[in-house]
Amino acid sequence: MGTDRKIVSTSSAPSAIGPYSQGVVAGGLVFCSGQIAIDPRSGAMVGAGDVMAQAQQVMENLKGVLSAAGTSFDRVVKTTIFLVNMSDFSAVNEVYGAYFSGAPPARATVQVSALPRGALVEIDAIATA
């Protein structure tokens, strides 16, 4: 598989804050790393304490990675949502759902004890290339 792997890198999403890529295209799929609510222009966390504002930025960051890989939300087949507080489920659902015009992808939502930089929500995605 080594040669059919393409790294996705874009200024439309935050730079990786560790040893990972924003996304990888391999085997006809785009694997997007989890995004938190970092504004790619300023590098600052968006929406302190506001899960809806954070979810909006997360989805915009994912949109940037998907676009850089030549795909879109219409081609997303699986996502995972990580929430610090499961009581934020409905609010995040409201923001998340607005990004999918057709049939939504498969999804898992899990509660975690903490996320990087104090984020309230993180979302990753897998799409067809």
Image: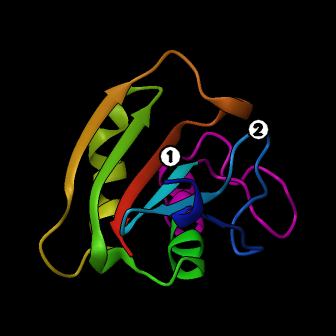
Query: Which of the labelled discs sits on residue 20, or is there none?
Result: none
User: Nearer the N terminus, badge 1 or badge 2?
Assistant: 2
* Quadrant assignment, res 27: bottom left
Mark 1, Cα crowd under 10 Å, few <14 / some 14-19 / many 20+, is: many
Residue hosting label 1: 51
| Spot occupied by residue 117 in the image (x, y as percentages of width and height) | 74, 33
Q: What residue range appears in magenta?
A: 35-61
Amino acid type, label 2? Pro
Residue hosting label 2: 19
Disc 1 versus disc 2: nearer the observer: 2
| Spot occupied by residue 22 in the image (x, y as percentages of width and height) | 65, 57
Magenta stretch encompasses residue 71: no
Q: Is residue 59 left or right of residue 100?
A: right
Look at the numbered disc 1 and give the secondary structure of its residue.
Answer: helix
| Spot occupied by residue 53 in the image (x, y as percentages of width and height) | 55, 58
Nearest to the observer: residue 79 or residue 119: 79
